[in-house]
Image (cartoon, grey):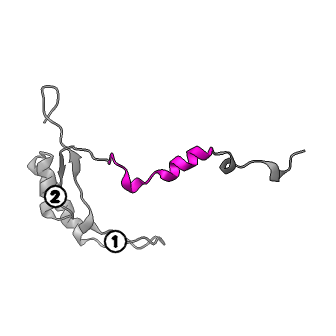
């Protein structure tokens, strides 16, 4: 009869060669690296009227949409953050956020620019 102490664990069943190969890997020395060479649009960090205008221009929005967004941004600036919920979280650091980042797509006959 086999006791609980006699049951081999997964760790005991791993092939020694596999363990040695994994230990020899050094992710800091990974020779192939990782990079993606894709052109992209990116707004500057933070949120301001200039950033709202920048994003609207990149999206080719009509003037009425920009006006609506700027009005909403100005209203947002006057608001206080609600404190009615008993929730604790770190304050958002908006100056560090990027609000637009997207890959550029080459325009072609079947792709809009």
**Residue 88 pos. (x, y %):** 45, 72
Mark toward the start of the polypeptide (2 vs 1): 2
Residue at image coords 68%, 45%? 13
Q: Which residues are magenta?
A: 15-33
Drawn side of residue 58 relative to residue 78, left or right: left
The main secondary structure of the magenta stretch is: helix
Residue at the extreme right of the image, as rendered: 1
The question of residue 20 being in magenta is answered with yes
> Front-most of 34 and 78?
34
Give the labeled residue for mark 2: 52
Answer yes or no: do the residues labelled 2 and 1 have beta carbons within 8 Å? no
In screen coordinates, is 47 left or right of 62?
right
Residue 81: assigned label = 1
Q: Quadrant of the C terminus?
A: top left
x 51%, y 53%: residue:
23
Q: Is disc 2 surrounded by few (<14), some (14 to 19) or many (20+) residues within 10 Å?
A: some
Location of residue 34 in the rendering, given as x and y in whole percent from the top left corner? 31, 47
**Would you say residue 89 sits in the magenta stretch?**
no
Q: Position of residue 36 (x, y in %)?
A: 26, 44
């Amino acid at each position: 009869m086999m006791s609980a102490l006699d049951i081999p664990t997964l760790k005991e069943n791993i092939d020694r060669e596999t363990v040695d190969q994994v230990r020899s890997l050094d992710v800091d020395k990974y020779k192939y690296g990782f990079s993606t060479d894709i052109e992209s649009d990116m707004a500057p960090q933070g949120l301001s009227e200039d950033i709202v205008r920048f994003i609207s221009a990149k999206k080719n929005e009509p003037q009425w949409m920009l006006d609506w967004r700027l009005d909403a941004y100005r209203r947002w600036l006057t608001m206080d953050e609600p404190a009615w919920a008993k929730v604790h979280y770190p304050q958002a650091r908006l100056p560090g956020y990027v609000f637009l980042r997207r890959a550029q797509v080459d325009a072609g006959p079947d792709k809009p620019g």
